[in-house]
Each structure stands twice: as C-alpha cells, then as structure tokens.
Image (tube, rainbow, N blue to C red):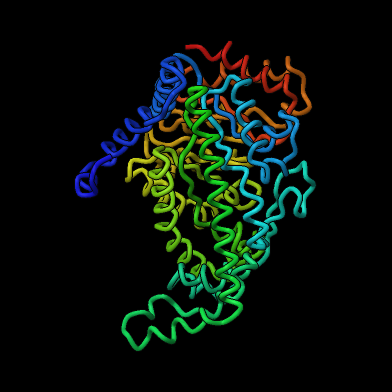
Amino acid sequence: MMNAENWDNLSPREKYEKRFESFINPELDFAGEEMEKKYRERAQMLKDVIELKRPERVPQCLNLGFYVADYAGYTAEDMMYDYEKLGEAYRKFHADFDVDTMASSMMMGPGQVFDILDYKLYQWPGNGVNEERSYQCLEKEYMKPEEYDILIKNPSYYWRTYYLPRVIGAMESWDKLSPWTDLVELPFMGPTFIPFGTPDVQESLRTLLEAGQAALEWAGAFGEIDASIQAGEGLPPIFGGFAKAPFDTLGDTLRGTEAIMIDMFRRPEKLKQAMAVLVDINVEMGVRSSTQNNHPIVFIPLHKGADEFMSEKQFDEFYWPTLEAVIKGLVEEGMVPFLFVEGSYDDRLDYLSKKADIPEEQTIWIFDDTDMEDAHEALGDIACIGGNVPGSLLQTGEPEDVERYVKNLLENVAEDGGFILSNGVVLDDAREENLKAMLQAGRKYGKY
C-alpha cells in the first residue's frame, strides 16, 4: 500500500480507506469484465453496510462449515485430505448459491498436517470423529494454574516451551530448549544449541519439515481454489484476518472452560494480567493476517462471553475490557473487527449500548441466537449487524418457513441499512431447498 513511515503518519480512518481501496481493487485475473464488476460492487457493498449505509440491497454472506462437502456429495474428511474434491465442492457451492461473499476453503484445515504433527487439541473427520462430521476441540488444562506468571512474563517462551509440547506430539521434546533470549554473547551460543543435537529434538525437526512441506502443498491448493472463485464468480472473501478475545484465547485452548471459570474466583488478578498481555498479541495477529490477505475485515469468534457462561458483572470485569482493547487496536490500524457472536447476547445488549465504547461505523456484529430486533435497537446506530437465520430452521424447517423468517427479519431490522443477512451457527447441516429459500427471500425482500 505504501511504505511504513508514510503509513504510520495516517489517521485510523485514512488507513481504513486505504485498506478498502486496495481490497475493492485487487490484482486478480478476473474471468471477464462482468465478474470484475460484480466483485467491486460486492466489495463496495460490504464497505457501505459497515458505514451503516443502504446499498442497493441487503448483502448475503454465509458462514460456511462442512455443508459444502455434503452438497457436493463428499464427506468432511474429503475436504481435509483430498484437495481436488475440496476445490470441486467449493466451486460448485459458490456457482450454485446466490451469495455475495466467498467462504474460504482454507477454513477446512489440512488433515495431513495435523496427522504428521500428532495434533492433540482437536479430533477431526477420520481422526477421532466420524468422516462426515465436523472437528471437535478437546478441552483440557493444557496450561497449569501455577504457570500464569511464566505466560505473563514471556508469552512466546511459554507457548514454545510449555503449551505447544502438550498439544503437538511432534514438539514434545521442545520443553528442553533454552529461551532464544539467551543468545546474546559468544559463550552462550554453544549451550543453547546442545538440545538440537539430541535424537528426540532432531526427530522433531525432521517431522516439522515434513509438516511444513505438507502445509505448503495445502496452501497452494486452497490459494488456487479461492482465487479461482473470487475471479470466476466475482466474490470477495467475507474476511481476511483472524483474532480472538483474550478471555477466549485463555479459556478455549489453554486453561479450558471449567478452569478459567474457577480462575475468575481464585486468581482473578493473574487472569486479568494474562489477558492484558494477550491484547497486543491478538491485535498484531489480526493486522498481520488481514494485511497479508489484502482484506480489512478481521474475524473474531466470541465464545465464552455469552449469556450462558457468565454474569453481566463478570462480563464487565473479565471479558469485555480486553476484547474492547483488541477491537480498538484493530480499528487504530484501519481494520474492521467482525464479531461473530456465538450463543445468546440478549443479556449483553444493554451493556453494549450503554457501557461499552464501540467505535462507530467500523465493526460488524453477526449474531447467532440473539433477538435481532433488540440487537438493532441497541447497536443499529453505531455498528453493522447481521444474522441470524437459525441452523435448526435450515435443517428441519420447510422453505416457506425459511422465507417467512427472512421476510420478518428484513422488515424489522434491515430497513435503515447497515445489515447483513447471514445464518446463525456455522453451517454444517442444511436442506438445499431451505438454504436457497433463504437466499431467494433475501433478494426478494432485501431491496432498498
């Protein structure tokens, strides 16, 4: 976009405009002028709804899971191991369904890489989970309560020396490595590299090289698939980067749900200190990943801040402050945080509208099981909102039920603009006729 010195002199809004200018005008070899035009119109439509404007119609952006496999006649396992089938499934879906954004085939993940690494944090199709089903996180206390201070003092060292050896079998021997910060003078070089001469560390390195080669093959495959869909169908991706709420970074995959809930009572200050350390890490990850993908929207799935997990007092004390800091840090760099609000936030809406400091016209909130009229009333004047066609309705309802739901949704919450029609939960299961009914109703009732 421009050199770092000039970039640092821009205001957050100027950075935002520069990022969107690049996103709307990508260097892609489009399949003709019509597809290039469609891409630019759809990308501009995303920018318009973020800014609470009323584009020509309500954009339709699906949050896709393994439904693409089922629709193409393949299994979830196929999507993670057979890149030819992965491409066929994603191209077929995007050609057949009238959506406005592309769901990246990257989200399926590389099963071969996980196999090589002996990845323990998840089970996935064909490896602990039925070949037709989605992956499953295996929560444990991968981080011990007495290790908070180590994480707080040096998170990178903690990840390498404690966390990764516990969740990646191929890195189990890395717990014997010295900190890289030891490498400051000649006398320290030799001792630091001694572990790299041991058989288990050398075997680990050989395994990581194998995993790296497999990851490169996967990256080449999904990169070609996604580029062909963008250029061939005129579809911009819905997001380009990824970040997390610091509470979720700790609670999802380090401490686990039960342990972090206990931490709120037994070691609240350590928990807060650790989350504060994770703010800059998540901001940097979101900015870096989005910049690499030339896309200003950063996906942030919200997990443990839902009504079912904690009280409003706990939300105010533990969850929101560092999440707000991540949001503001991303906005400062011209990004658009895309908050995917899993579960219900009905009890959070009053807090978000009255106590939270949400940057205006620069966030997206896609809701799952939250009352959309209440969400519109709470956030409609400051943020783009979207959702929340239920996965249960798409799986078990009838097309007329889906049309009725979408019609009511658009009439009640989309009239002022700043709205995205989307499904609620990640779409793994649906009836084809119901999903098409959703999108057809969106076109029919979503015109301004």
- Between residue 102 and residue 252, name the one nearer to us: 102
Q: Quadrant of residue 404?
A: top right
Residue shown at the point (71%, 41%) measured from the top left: 78
- Between residue 419 and residue 187, name the one nearer to us: 187
Query: Where does the image place residue 166, in percent across and percent down from the top left?
Result: 63, 69
Horizontally, residue 191 falls left or right of residue 169, namely: left
Q: Quadrant of residue 422?
A: top right
| 267 versus 3 height, above or below | below
Q: Quadrant of residue 172?
A: bottom right
Horizontally, residue 98 falls left or right of residue 434, namely: left
Horizontally, residue 270 falls left or right of residue 89, namely: left
| 220 versus 167 height, above or below | above
Query: Where does the image place residue 63, in percent across and percent down from the top left?
Result: 59, 34
Query: Where does the image place residue 6, in percent across and percent down from the top left?
Result: 19, 45
Residue shown at the point (52%, 29%) measured from the top left: 228
Residue shown at the point (32%, 30%) measured from the top left: 21
Asked if one can make out residue 369 in the rendered structure from this viewpoint, the answer is no
Query: Where does the image place residue 375, in percent across and percent down from the top left?
Result: 53, 32
Residue shown at the point (47%, 33%) measured from the top left: 379
Locate the N terminus by quadrant.
top left
